Image (tube, rainbow, N blue to C red):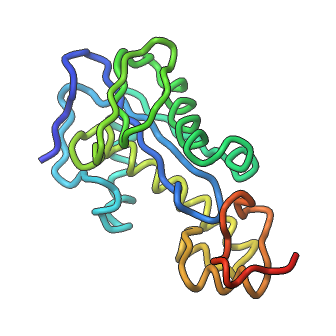
Amino acid sequence: MLKLNYSDIPLECGTDEAGRGCLAGPVTAAAVLLPPDFENSILNDSKQLTENKRELLRPIIETEALSFAFTHVFETEIDEVNILNASILAMQRSILKLTPSPEFIIVDGNRFKPLNDIPFETIIKGDGKYMSIAAASVLAKTYRDEYMNRIHEEFPMYNWKQNKGYPTKEHRDAIMKYGSTKYHRKSFKLLPEQLKLNL
């Protein structure tokens, strides 16, 4: 059973990201401020939910949240600042879009950087413990999937509609065959060592 709050501070937001381990596409984060009476029996860490359940939950979260926001940080910026910093930036930018501004932040994972003196707590596996982080994980995942489905149309040979940019065998085979695209993260090891392309 997920808990509603971590702290006793009224405006507590949860934040999470999706797509950190992908070879292509953005890292996407969301931040959610839930009302004090929020209840939902289906809500869980987005990785534990089916695609249908995530799609079902998204409009519920968006309708019932006091405020929500999401942010994509794209490949070029990921390559410039590295994936950890890009993930934190995506979360921070999402939090800054919330109105009212949160007074406390709970973050999925163990890394975050101070934002405008707002107190925060990092929580490992927080998306399976707190509703606002779980809600943020659902939004981050669904908005990122939507984006990957859209760019799939441009480069169908990588099958991003299915693998969402993660390093599946099929995705790596396609990189081997067709090379990389403008959506691939150049700072990532796109192919295992023994499959290096002579570019």
Position of 43 relative to 121 (above/below): below
Going 39% across and 19% down the picture, which residue do you hit? 102
Residue 11 rendering spot, x and y as whole percentages: 32, 18
**Image position of 89 (left or right of 105):** right
Q: Position of residue 65 (x, y in %)?
A: 35, 33
The one nearer the camera, 39 or 124, is 124
Q: In this image, 119 relative to 117: left or right?
A: left
Residue that appears at 34% across and 44% down: 135
The quadrant the C terminus occupies is: bottom right
| Residue closest to the far top | 117
Q: Residue most toward the left? A: 1
Residue 183 sits in which quadrant?
Answer: bottom right
Q: Residue at x 64, y 44 (%)?
A: 73
**Left or right position of 87 against 194:** left
Q: Is residue 24 above or below residue 170?
A: above
Q: Nearer the viewer, residue 154 or 167?
A: 167
Where is residue 194, by image quadrant? bottom right
Residue found 30% across the figure and 31% down from its top: 34
Up/down of 121 relative to 60, above or below:
above
Q: Is residue 21 above or below residue 4?
A: below
Give the farthest residue toward the front: 194
Q: Position of residue 29 (x, y in %)?
A: 50, 43
Q: Position of residue 162 (x, y in %)?
A: 53, 77
